[in-house]
Image: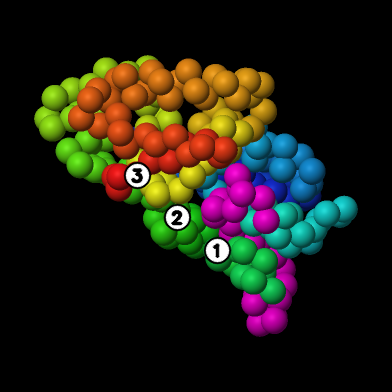
Amino acid sequence: MTAKTVLIVDDEAPIREMIAIALEMADYHVLEASNAQDAHAMIVDHQPDLLLLDWMMPGISGIELARRLKREEATAELPIIMLTAKGEEDNKIQGLEAGADDYITKPFSPRELVARLKAVLRRATPRGVEEAVEIDGLLLDPMSHRISAHGKALEMGPTEYRLLQFFMTHQERAYTRSQLLDQVWGGNVYVEERTVDVHIRRLRKALGDAHQHLIQTVRGTGYRFSARG
């Protein structure tokens, strides 16, 4: 299983270091940022699986960054745990209303943090990211990195695989080419939007006659994955 990536955002280096050591010992990949601006750039570039976000930071506060991330479509589903010395009930409510998935008050034990982090990631992980997902005989198994159609193995490139995995875990919704570039290629990869069309064609070809209809063209928008006609 690929290690989950956690971005720690805190202006105090000793706290970042303490958290980073605990997470690395628990087999997480760790990124660090000391302010909201750097954190936002790293989120776009590296697409972490979870954000540990300090409430009180100079400049843009953690709560403002959380609100901004929840407003932006590409980051709206990013799980956030707020880290703060504020223990009052109304501040907890404010943090949760801003989009935080959990809230942990300093000082905290590394074991408690890791346990809370695991719980949030379990809730946030869609099927098909760690579990196999099957639609109309099309099976994607991320553990073995294999795709099969009615038991027969399908061959496709790594980009087509990522595209299919995104589609199969985000069904029945139309995505623009720009949104697909952000979600599948990453926000700071400079690729022309028509590149998406090329990979969609390759993906349909790899899926074959039995399943290529699942990738639907939505006129004026982009593409949708749907088992409906």
Q: Which residue is drawn at 23% across and 25% down?
A: 209
Q: How many residues crowd around disc 1 within 10 Å: few (fewer than 14), some, or many (20 or more)?
A: many
Q: Mark 1 points at which residue?
A: 101
**Are the residues tagged 2 and 1 within 8 Å (C-beta)?**
yes
Callout 1 secondary element: loop
Q: Residue at x 73, y 51 (%)?
A: 10
Magenta-colored stretch includes residue 177: no
Q: Which of pointers 3 and 1 lies earlier in the amino acid sequence? A: 1
Q: Name the residue under label 2.
A: 124
Q: Which of pointers 2 and 3 lies earlier in the amino acid sequence? A: 2
Residues at marks 2 and 3, CA–CA distance in whole angstroms: 22 Å
Name the image quarter holding residue 194.
top right
In depth, the one of 156 and 86 nearer the eye is: 156
* Left or right, 12 with reference to 137: right
Q: In this figure, which colouring scheme has been used for the structure?
A: rainbow
Question: Hey, what amino acid is under mark 1?
Answer: Asp
Callout 3 secondary element: loop
Q: Which residue is drawn at 60% across and 63% down?
A: 100
Q: Quadrant of the C terminus?
A: top left
Q: Height in image: 36 above or below 95?
A: above
Q: Height in image: 190 above or below 6?
A: above
Q: How many residues crowd around disc 2 within 10 Å: few (fewer than 14), some, or many (20 or more)?
A: some
From which residue to which does the magenta span run?
71-93
User: Residue 107, how many percent across, how many down?
Assistant: 64, 65
Q: Residue farthest to the bottom?
A: 89
Q: Mark 3 points at which residue?
A: 226
Q: Residue farthest to the right?
A: 59
Question: Hey, what amino acid is under mark 3?
Answer: Ser
Question: Hey, what amino acid is under mark 2?
Answer: Ala
Residues at marks 2 and 1, CA–CA distance in whole angstroms: 9 Å
Q: Which of pointers 2 and 1 lies earlier in the amino acid sequence? A: 1
Name the image quarter holding residue 37.
top right
